[in-house]
Image (cartoon, rainbow, N blue to C red):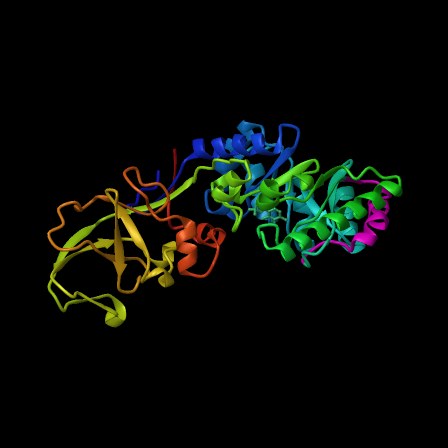
Amino acid sequence: MRMRCTKLIINLADLRHNFFEIKKTVGEKIKVCASVKADAYGHGAVNCAKELESCGIDFLAVATVDEGVELRKNGIKVPILMLSLCCPEEVRVAVKNNLTPLVFDEEYIDLFEQAAALENAEEFSVHLAVDSGMGRIGCMPERSGILALYISEKPHLVLGGICTHFACADSLEQTDVDYTLQQLEKFNLACMSVEKAGINPGIKHCSSSAAALNLSSANFDMIRAGLILYGYYPSQITENYLASTGRKVELKKVMTFQTEVVAVRPFKKGQSVSYGHTWTASEDTLIAVLPVGYADGLRRSFSPGIKVCINGKLYPVCGRICMDQCMVNIGKDNADVKRWDTAVIFGTCPQGNAMTADDLAVLDSTISYEIMTGISKRVPRIYL
Ligand SMILES: *Cc1c(COP(=O)(O)O)cnc(C)c1O
């Protein structure tokens, strides 16, 4: 096992809890596709995928061929959706590993037909992506019938599903809610035109975490959930909001980013800390040194503002965060903090309230997704 003071603790029991909580919320009959792209949002794709497979997950979703291949190499058997397009050179590997692509034009469909023929694949499944308003990938809704027909005429392909993606399902603003409902209507029309062409559209799926919690009419046959599996609520769809609507969904944060105090050093009034001497002690104090920095994912922009949790109490990082280290002001005569004590950067602190990835996201004007996916490979993942 890799050892280092700085580590990411991943609680797989909490992942399991979140899966069943989500299952309870959307209903047993709705399939769940777990998004494990970007190394399962930093949690480690293989370990999370194995845990989810043992929970009975229906589908997994990745972004790249490499991500899918890694799961297959580790024995993952469930269907894997590939949410981004791959390059022509990767298509054959995708087919060989039975990764299910999202397709939406003739050229890309042809690439998969050719590869499926070369691999002697029978009924290689592809899902038709519809752009109902996200403006990313997908066909225009009115082309869905034609494309479904095109797929159905390919000897080695089968239409396994049809899907779309919402642009602002995490917002409660009326204009955004209206936009989502318009997207939903366009998707419904797209599904109808496939059915009118006499083709079974397969599994219908649209909702990522936000819509899964907030728009049950968009569940169709399957939801694609990422963020909520890892224990975070999407934007305005908070725990409090859900409770107020009578739909309590209790999620547990799966990831804890922590390190240890590697030194405690007395500082005199007037001594300064770190690059640019942006912070100077206004009185005699103790400074704790932590072996974690921006190369680990502790962004430079977090300071000032970030507080770390040591033995249940929050202490501010002072001065600039360095590549591999940062410093924390623990105050004068502090006997609560000792060398080798655990310092929680975000996640679960046994005795108290550590910051969350949401709190850190605010400090960098971003979202929790980017904080979690930003924890670098250098940080060992420890699984509970
Ligand atoms: C990443 C992604 C998801 C999962 O989104 P969450 O907000 O994490 O639930 C679902 N669908 C698509 C197309 C995605 O790219």
Q: Nearer the viewer, residue 333 or 130?
A: 333
Q: Position of residue 63 (x, y in %)?
A: 60, 49
Number of numbered tags placed on the structure image? 0
Q: Position of residue 158 (x, y in %)?
A: 79, 39
Q: Residue at x 23, y 70 (%)?
A: 277
Magenta-drawn segment: 136-159
Q: Residue furthest right?
A: 197
On whether residue 152 falls in the magenta region, the answer is yes
Q: Is residue 119 visible?
A: no
Coordinates of residue 359 in the picture (x, y in percent)? 40, 53
Residue 382 seen in render: yes
Q: Is residue 266 left or right of residue 116?
A: left
Q: Up-down: is 258 above or below 324?
A: above
- Residue 286's quadrant in the figure? bottom left
Magenta-colored stretch includes residue 232: no
Residue at x 59% of width, y 55% of height: 173
* Residue pictured at 55% horizontal, 39% vertical: 245
Can you say which quadrant of the picture contains the N terminus? Answer: top left
| 340 on left or right of 188 | left
Q: Can you say which quadrant of the picture contains the C terminus?
A: top left
Residue 84 percent location from the top left of the image: 64, 52
Q: Is residue 376 above or below residue 226?
A: below
Q: Nearer the viewer, residue 206 or 200?
A: 206
Residue at 66% from the left image edge and 37% from the top image edge: 222
Outermost residue toward the bottom in this view:
276
